[in-house]
Image (cartoon, helix red, strand yellow):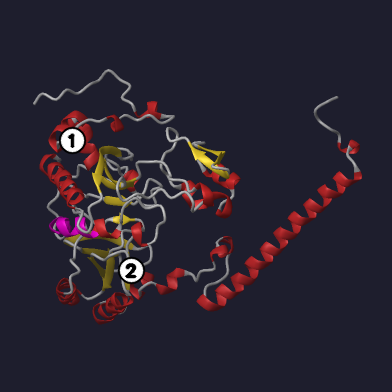
Amino acid sequence: MPKAILLSNRSDFELSSYFFSFVSVLLLFFFGLLRDVISGCILMVLSEVPLTLPLLVHLDLWVIYCKKFLPPIIQNNYGKWKYHENPRPGVLLHVSESGDKLWSVRAASPRLIATDTIRWYAEMAKKYAGGYLRFTSRNNVEFLVTEEKNIDPLIDELTKQGYPVGGTGNAISNIVHTQGWVHCHSAATDASGIVKCVMDDLTPYFTSMKLPGKLRIALACCLNMCGAVHCSDIAILGIHRHAPSTKHDQVKKICEIPSVVSACPTAAIRPATVDDNQSVEVLEENCMYCANCYTVCPAMPLNDPETDGVSIWVGGKVSNARTEPRFSKLAIPFLPNNPPRWPEVTETVRKLVEIWAAGARKYERMGDWIERIGWPRFFKLAGIEFQKQHIDDFKHAGLTFKRSTHLRFDKE
């Protein structure tokens, strides 16, 4: 019997199934196209933008074309900017081919802010920037100023209200971070709290441009990494250190056991009967503490205030300037959660910043500096003791190992 079955040998039922499937696909395509055309007409009316094919492709988002919300100076000079300068910390100057000038005044802002703060930002924008501001990807607020005389009064008011101006050029920008205890169910540490403490301590490096190069810090409250901890100069990562504590009498009542088993990326969960309860068991040697199981089964909590903590990673970056992008690597396996000010974390981050600032060359990022001096030398300067956690042991760990005979020895 050949493996391929001829179409003529199939039953009428099979043929009708294929026919209806084909018709269903055509109908879905037709109604999808009809929806996009209708939404395109709505978009054209609301935003006064001509309907084009590229716009139709993105209409699933149901957003108004953003260009109409740009400041007039940006609309008039769209794609015609001649050059950009950084005349002082926190102030960027954009000059167009027509001679128009736009100043971006950047101030530190929390990621989670009150409505009163947003209203105050709006008042400042209306007073000094023609009503225009924006938020950067690192949660800084930027006021788009068209008159140079408004820059100093705006900076004075921002500083007076506790919003330091800076974060441009060779400086530390605001920390991009995740939700933390405010919202995330799998958080091993807080996000906003640690960020507040670290940035309070590093404010002098935010309001000046005295560092060798730019420095990006990120925080993720667990290893699912909603933040950019995998590619930042310094990364603060919350970690769990034990497997979920399963409430066996509740698993069957509130969880779907097959979904729980399939949710584990390392196959560490399997069905089991515990004390006559249909439940699951966790192979802790396979568990990576990601909390995927807790996401689908509230009867498997992972959070533990006694053992959860923070790890520190270094050397990552997205930029391909001078050297290629690279992932962050583990520096400190564990620091305790010690709210409300997290002194151990704050002190460690400051130390890493200062030893990099003291030894790096101009424009040299943290990872480039470490690669130049060698990891043994970096560990010695930072006072980090080598531990078993520093050895990669995941499936493709060999790709991260040093695989050449070119070694660098610490002579000091």
The image quarter containing residue 286 is top left
Q: Which residues are magenta?
A: 196-206
Q: Position of residue 185 (x, y in %)?
A: 42, 56
Check disc 2 and report its element: helix, strand or loop: strand
Check disc 1 and report its element: helix, strand or loop: loop
- Residue located 25% across and 74% down the image: 146
- Which residue lies most toward the front here? 275
Q: In the depicted view, which residue is nearer to us: 7 or 97?
A: 7
Of the residues under marks 1 and 2, which one precedes in the sequence? 2
Left or right for 60, reference 339: right
Which residue is the site of mark 2?
Answer: 134
Is residue 225 something one can see in this rendering? yes
Q: Position of residue 148 (x, y in %)?
A: 19, 74
Which residue is the site of mark 1?
Answer: 384
Q: Is residue 193 magenta?
A: no
Left or right for 176, reference 255: left
Q: Position of residue 273 (x, y in %)?
A: 57, 40
Kindly identify the amino acid type of the residue bearing the numbered disc 2. Arg
The image quarter containing residue 97 is bottom left
Kindly identify the amino acid type of the residue bearing the numbered disc 1. Ile
| Number of residues whose C-alpha sits closer than 10 Å to that of mark 1, classed few (under 14), some (14–19) or many (20 or more) | few
Q: In the depicted view, which residue is nearer to us: 386 or 71?
A: 386
Query: Which-is-in-front pick, marks 1 and 2?
Result: 1
